[in-house]
Image: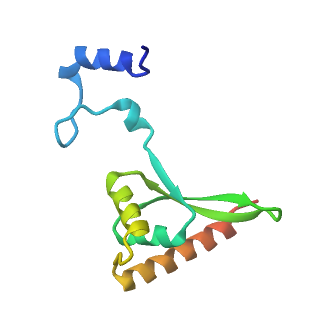
Amino acid sequence: MYCKYEKYLINMKINMKNMELDNIGLPVDPILQSEPKLFSTRDIYLASVLVTMDIPLYNLDFTTEGRESKRIGIFVFLDTPELRKIEQDYFNIPDFKVDIKKYTMNMKSLKSRTNNSYKQLPY
């Protein structure tokens, strides 16, 4: 069976002494390092929770939707296990708690960034 990383794995075994190590001593995968996994959501409430829980916003994108070509903001984060755990807790735990002042401030900030970015787009 062919593995798309087969050549990389063979080279990794041969050149193990020359590879860089990450902070826990594992070889750094140059294939995965070059293209990070991203998590995106249109849900401003979830995005506000993620920012409140110290997950940094990676990018703010836009898409058009509907007959009127309404622009919708898409919040993009780096996909990490911590982010996935917060997302699952947010949707599955009825009494999920965050600092309400920080959450409200982050929501206002995200709304402001979305509106300001939307106005700056040329199309």
Residue lying at 56% horizontally and 71% vertically, measured from the top left: 113
In the image, is residue 38 above or below residue 63?
A: above
Using the image as rendered, state which of residue 120 and residue 50 is in the foreground.
Answer: 50
- Quarter-of-image position of residue 106: bottom left
Viewer can see residue 39? yes
- Residue 80 percent coordinates (x, y): 36, 51
Q: Quadrant of the C terminus?
A: bottom right
Expressed as whole percent of the image width and height from the top left, the position of residue 84 reads: 38, 56
Quadrant position of the N terminus in the picture:
top left
Q: Is residue 103 left or right of residue 108?
A: left
Q: Quadrant of residue 18?
A: top left
- Identify the residue at image location x=35%, y=20%: 8
**Residue 50 visible to the viewer:** no
Residue 52: x and y in percent read 37, 72
Residue 73: give x, y in percent of width and height: 61, 64
Query: Which one is nearer the viewer's eye here, 59 or 7?
Result: 7
Decide: is 29 above or below 10. Answer: below
